[in-house]
Amino acid sequence: MLATAMETRTGLSRRTFFLGAGVAATSLALKRTAFGWPRGDEVRVAVIGVHGRGRDHVEGFRKLPGVRLVAVCDVDQHVLAGEVDRLDKAGLKVEGLRDARALFERKDIDAVSIATPNHWHALLAVWACQAGKDVYVEKPVSHSVWEGRQIVRAARKHERIVQTGTQCRSSEGIAEAFAWVREGHLGKIQLARGLCYKPRASIGKVDGPQTVPEWIDYDMWSGPAPVVPLLRKSLHYDWHWVNLTGNGDLGNQGVHQMDLARWALGESGLPGEVISVGGRLGYVDDGETPNTQIVVLGYERAPLVFEVRGLPHDSAAQETDWGGGMDAFKDTRIGVVVQCEGGWLRVADYESAQAYDEGGKELKSWKGATDHFANFIDAVRSRKRESLHADIEEGHVSSALCHVGNVSQALGSAASADQLHAAVAKSAPLSESLERVLAHLTANGIDLAKTPLTLGRKLRIDSAKESFIDDAQADRLLKRAYRDPYTVPAV
């Protein structure tokens, strides 16, 4: 019944789509990989998901020379109609579509840009590669570790250009700063710390299932995830804080800084171990993901420590200035601090960095960035994926770091402060972060005896296989169960 209804609505059966996709992928690969992009031709783009971040994709592509926005796609009819109308008033005629599969068989679309909720990223990216389209996909590129690897395989198999939406990778200033640090100018790197101190107030608590508006195709919105009753006030955006569709702030804002921290260390794969400590504290709402979290990723070169804080500095700030009252570490709220023997490097925005000596004196600074969307289009034209600033392999690994942290968290159990201290005593980076987090929670009036933190399971990782060692329960969380027809293909 579901497939039949979908075929009627789009005029595109699953069999027709995949047969057509194979032919399109073959012909496009022959034309564009062997000979490069025809000089002077437009690159024709469609954006999938135009609520929120997707609007930035639309504006990012439509301003580029030699790029034509052909279509936009969204399962929310009101959002879709509003975007088509907005662009029409701006003098740009685009087609609005509700089913992304209808985009993939069209010959007038060369690339798709994906800005949907996280749980749709991998399936759309793989389908697009199979159909011969190049892909720009938002971070995190996947909802699970297994999904991310399938995108990489699909990109390589079908010779597609696939860019990850981690814009910091297009900063030459940050790139130069990381190279300078790895050259040893501040001594040996001791650890890289990612920070996501971003205000996250309660999303509220509803009394029972909510009605999904009739203008939203909720079955298609759910896609690869199970169709469950809507148990929160807002369908849009707050999906970030529900495990079936989002990855918490670790995988939302945090994946940018996770990517930067890994880049700083010069690591190309997963670490040997991971552990998380965290919880959703300070309010009771319909969110599930932590608003307070520490993740330690055990790389041999140096540990990567990641901290999430959604609560402000203290209880008073909750009443007066939640956003302005956020904590900072070395004057950084959302960014990366690379601690070295002789000082530290600070990255507190998307295009600059500063180096300091042990006493806090600034030694050197860097600044500068290029357009991330333009970098993608340049690679589409040249067919040289090595020119991408954020190739899908990089996006997959950084997304996977967030995922393994959340797996550790999901398999944890409530622990008292004493239990936490005992468990982390042998890890100096985790102990130091924990002490600051406990003080932060106390300042926010949180009684950990009543609402304890969760001590995640310490997991060992086989980096080459991208799986856990001797932990079948954790391995099961590397991939979700799918429902037909929204199944991410094993490539």
Image (cartoon, rainbow, N blue to C red):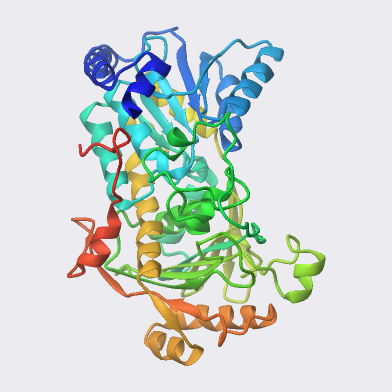
Work out whether residue 142 or residue 156 is closer to the camera in this orientation and state it.
Answer: 142
Residue 43, x across and y down, in percent: 45, 15
Residue 374, x across and y down, in percent: 50, 27
Find residue 415 and report its image quarter: bottom left
Residue 352, x across and y down, in percent: 59, 50
- In the rendered view, tell whether residue 440 sits above or below residue 378: below
| Quadrant holding the N terminus | top left
**Residue 352 falls left or right of residue 402:** right
Report the residue at 28% width, 56% height from top. 478
- In the rendered view, tell whether residue 329 sits above or below residue 256: below
Q: Is residue 384 visible?
A: no
Work out whether residue 303 or residue 184 is closer to the camera in this orientation and state it.
Answer: 303
**Residue 347 falls left or right of residue 303:** right
Q: Is residue 242 visible?
A: yes
Q: Residue furthest right?
A: 320
| Quadrant holding the C terminus | top left
Residue 105, x across and y down, in percent: 34, 15
